[in-house]
Image (tube, rainbow, N blue to C red):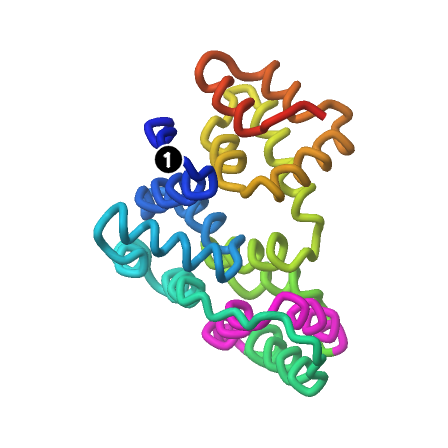
Amino acid sequence: MLQFNYLNSICLYRYVTVCCVLQGLGSDEESLTEMMCSRNNVELVEIKKVYREMFKKELEKDVSGDTSGDFAKMLLALAQAKRNEPSNVVDYEKIENDARALYEAGVNRKGTDVMTWISIFSERSVPHLQKVFERYKRYSPYEIKESIRKEVKGDLEKSFLTLGAYQLCLENKHLYFASRLNDAMKSKSMKEKVVTRIIVSRCEVVLMKIRAEFKRSFGKSLYQTISEHTKGDYQRALLNLCSGDD
Ligand SMILES: [Ca+2]
């Protein structure tokens, strides 16, 4: 991965890394889900561009070649980067309609109308969705997170949950990443892949917030924790990306 050090732009470097992970897709649905579900439009468009330049093919084509069923449909919908930008005008009617549609397509019927869920989850703006999920509680006996768990399974379940948790701040997403880093580094066989993926693929601003959340939650800085649990070139690379102690 470090062969891309020559790239001047750290941002491009991160996108390149994301693309390398994505290229191994098919074998690693977990990475794929995390890479695709926790990105905004600008990032998705940039990732697709870098992917095309690096591998001379379209990300969407590889996604549909390596995944199948509703999970593939979800990833392809995300890859279109069609999420609305937040608007100053709150559309209460649309919030109501989406909340009801989510309920009727899921908990209120036998099976799940996955396409309705996918289009709402992948196209609505983040603030709109937050209000939809709040409104959803008026219809459904279960909150959206619980509804996802009941309605869909496997990779599809993980991708809806990821969209809910990371992107929509149903939970504190920086805390989420801080906890994943902490768990990965402290597990018996340190999960290098998880650590690398989170540290390398997050932009500086987000990583700073993860660092702050890490220190606040675990009483020790991310920098110190990396120093204690890794070694050699790998350690130097991570500490470099971490860019400072807290
Ligand atoms: Ca159902």
Q: Which residues are magenta?
A: 110-138
Q: Is residue 122 above or below residue 28?
A: below
Using the rendered view, name the quadrant where residue 145 is placed. bottom right
Relative placement, left or right, of 76 versus 182 is: left
Residue 32 point in image, percent of width and height:
42, 48
Residue at 68 percent across and 40 percent down: it is 209
| Secondary-structure class at tag 1 | loop
Residue 88 point in image, percent of width and height:
70, 76
Residue 144 point in image, percent of width and height:
66, 65
Residue farthest bottom in this picture: 93
Residue farthest left in this picture: 56
Q: Is residue 73 above or below residue 189?
A: below
Residue at 77 percent across and 25 percent down: it is 219
Using the rendered view, name the quadrant where residue 71 is placed. bottom left
Q: Is residue 111 above or below residue 176?
A: below
Depth order, front residue of 41/185? 41
Specify the amino acid type for callout 1: Leu
Residue 122 point in image, percent of width and height:
51, 68
Residue at 47 percent across and 70 percent down: it is 82
Q: Which residue is mark 1?
A: 7
Relative placement, left or right, of 121 versus 225 is: left
Label 1 packing within 10 angstroms: few (<14), some (14-19), many (20+): few
Count numbered badges in the picture: 1
Residue at 50 percent across and 27 percent down: it is 191
Q: Is mark 1 within 8 Å of ligand 1?
A: no
Q: Which quadrant is home to the C terminus?
A: top right
Q: Give the dominant element type of the magenta stretch: helix, strand or loop.
A: helix
Whether the magenta-drawn stretch holds residue 133 is answered as yes
Q: Which quadrant is home to the N terminus?
A: top left
Using the rendered view, name the quadrant where residue 61 is placed. bottom left
Depth order, front residue of 109/226? 226
